[in-house]
Amino acid sequence: MHPVLFEIPMPWGDQPVYSYGVMLGTSLLVAWYTIMWLGAKKESLSAELMRNTFIVTAISAIVSSRLLYVATNPDEFHSFGDVFNLQGGGLVAYGGFLG
């Protein structure tokens, strides 16, 4: 798999679209529709409950992925603000699983 799928031309320079981000977004969309379908159709659960649970789970997975990346790569961060700079990448897949 190519790390950069394509680049979008912008006035300040080309913006790369990374394959990891596209796959993460695709997986979240598929999970959203699967959860809503399974919860509403199969299990007769409240749509609001399923929606809230999914949002909390997705956010905690992304945050824990970033935190584990920061913990496993401390040399890449020179200041506290670098932790929040997402342009440089930095998510760990198993961090999302643990989150």
Image (tube, rainbow, N blue to C red):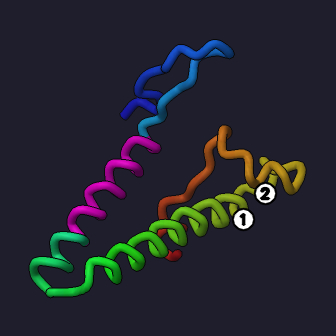
* Residue 98 in picture, x, y percent from top left: 51, 76
For the N terminus, which image quadrant?
top left
Q: Which of 95 and 7 is in front in this view?
A: 7
Asked whether residue 24 is drawn in magenta, I would say yes
Asked whether residue 58 is drawn in magenta, I would say no
* Residue 44 in picture, x, y percent from top left: 15, 87
Image: magenta residue range? 20-35
Residue at left 71%, top 59%? 70
Residue at left 33%, top 79%? 48
- Other-residue count near label 2 (Cα within 10 Å), few / some / many at <14 / 14–19 / ≥20: few
Q: Mark 2 points at which residue?
A: 74
Q: Mark 1 points at which residue?
A: 71
Image label count = 2
Circle 1 SS class? helix
* Residue 36 in picture, x, y percent from top left: 23, 70
Are circles 2 and 1 on residues that touch, CB within 8 Å?
yes
Residue at left 20%, top 79%? 39
Q: In this view, does 14 lie to the left or right of 80?
A: left
* Residue 33 in picture, x, y percent from top left: 23, 62
